[in-house]
Image: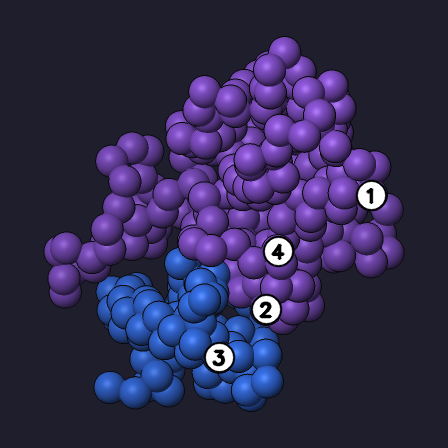
Chain colours: A purple, B blue
Amino acid sequence: MITSHFLPAAFRMFGLYSGITNAPKLDVWGIDEYHVSCAYQASFPVIAAHDIVDYEEQNPLSAVLLCAHLYYRALQTVPTLVRLWILECKGRELSAAVTAYTSKYFSSVLIDTELERATKTRLGDEKMHVKVIPVHREVNMTYTIDENEIKMSLKIPPDWPLHVIEVRGGKKVGVKEDRWKSWMSGVRQVVVTQVGFVVGVPRQFHISRIPQGNVVDGLELFKRNVSAHFENQTECAICYS
Amino acid sequence: MTLLQATHLLNDKSVEVQKMAYQLLHESAKKRTEYIVIEAGVSTPESDSIKPELPAELIAFLQQSINEEDPDAPPTFGYLLGWMSVFDLFVDSVSRHVR
């Protein structure tokens, strides 16, 4: 239903079927929040305190902004379906317009949120270091054991989530190739998993609490694997095998 | 008021009534998600898995297309609020497996 009804309706409202030129410019609006004020209950719903948009019946832009908020939520919760729609879209100009519009007005908001979550994460400790590089849309996680480092990088593409987060394995001292590949594969799966029901994901990738975002979940899984691997391991000070 | 009635109110001409309908659907979505998350959390691979499904009346409503020239089409705002209640179902919806 998302691909057959919601997305076509949304893209029609944005006017993308006739290109991106006349599509509404959203950069001055906060698309990540939308407040539905209800005369019947003043306390509804719980809202954030910035750039909140409300619906004005007489203003045609109101419906477009609500639609933009919904598309933002679709990208957040069911990015795989949006990717699938673009992949199956037969109109080349339409899919190009959707990709460009998404990158221009939606990706940066989603990426900023993701990087902010990574910045605020408490996964860092005396051995594990998390470094967020906003300008490169990159998060590095480094585990230090004696003078050696084990490193993984997560790179968010500029049109995320239309393209998936790239997982790069860096230094891997003391970890066998097979194990390292399995770790990277696990992180890859976590960073592309839609927020929402994770039914169908193998049990070993289930996270034990509500996710904080794709990047943070990937970092958490990497930290858990590395920490468990090196816990009480003192056999060889050179290779840690 | 049932979900069927709340969904029906999204079709009302008054924006205020549509907002009230959304409020009811929003509350219902929260409770439904909570229930499904708990059920999925305590289920085992061997037991029958929970199928998170949308209410049939909401599905039927959202399968319409919005066209201002069509007198039978749902109001744009009400239709979008219907989708908003669908996305509300995803809030806090990740299953926490009980170990």
Q: Is residue B41 above or below residue A103?
A: below
Could you tell whether A48 is left or right of B76 in the image? left
User: 10 Å neighbourhood of mark 1: few (<14), some, or many (≥20)?
Assistant: few
Query: Which residue is identified by label 3?
Result: B43
Question: Percent from the top left, x then y, of residue A88?
Answer: 82, 58
Point out the tag, 1 or 2, that comes first from the N-terminus: 1
| Residue furthest top as drawn | A147
* Front one among B62 and A215: A215
> Is residue A16 visible to the viewer in this orientation of the structure?
no
The residues tagged by marks 1 and 4 sit, at their Cα atoms, a distance apart of 17 Å
Nearer to us: label 2 or label 3? 3
> Is residue B1 visible to the viewer in this orientation of the structure?
yes
Quadrant of res A1: bottom right
Badge 1 amino acid: Asp
Q: Do the residues labelled 1 and 4 touch (CB within 8 Å)?
A: no
The residues tagged by marks 2 and 4 sit, at their Cα atoms, a distance apart of 11 Å
Quadrant of res B5: bottom left
Query: Which residue is identified by label 4?
Result: A205
Q: Are marks 2 and 3 on the same chain?
A: no
User: 10 Å neighbourhood of mark 2: few (<14), some, or many (≥20)?
Assistant: some
Query: Which residue is identified by label 2?
Result: A199
- Report in which chain the residue with disc 4 lies: A
* Front one among A99 and B70: A99
- Report in which chain the residue with disc 3 lies: B
Which residue appears at 24% of the width and 86% of the height? B1
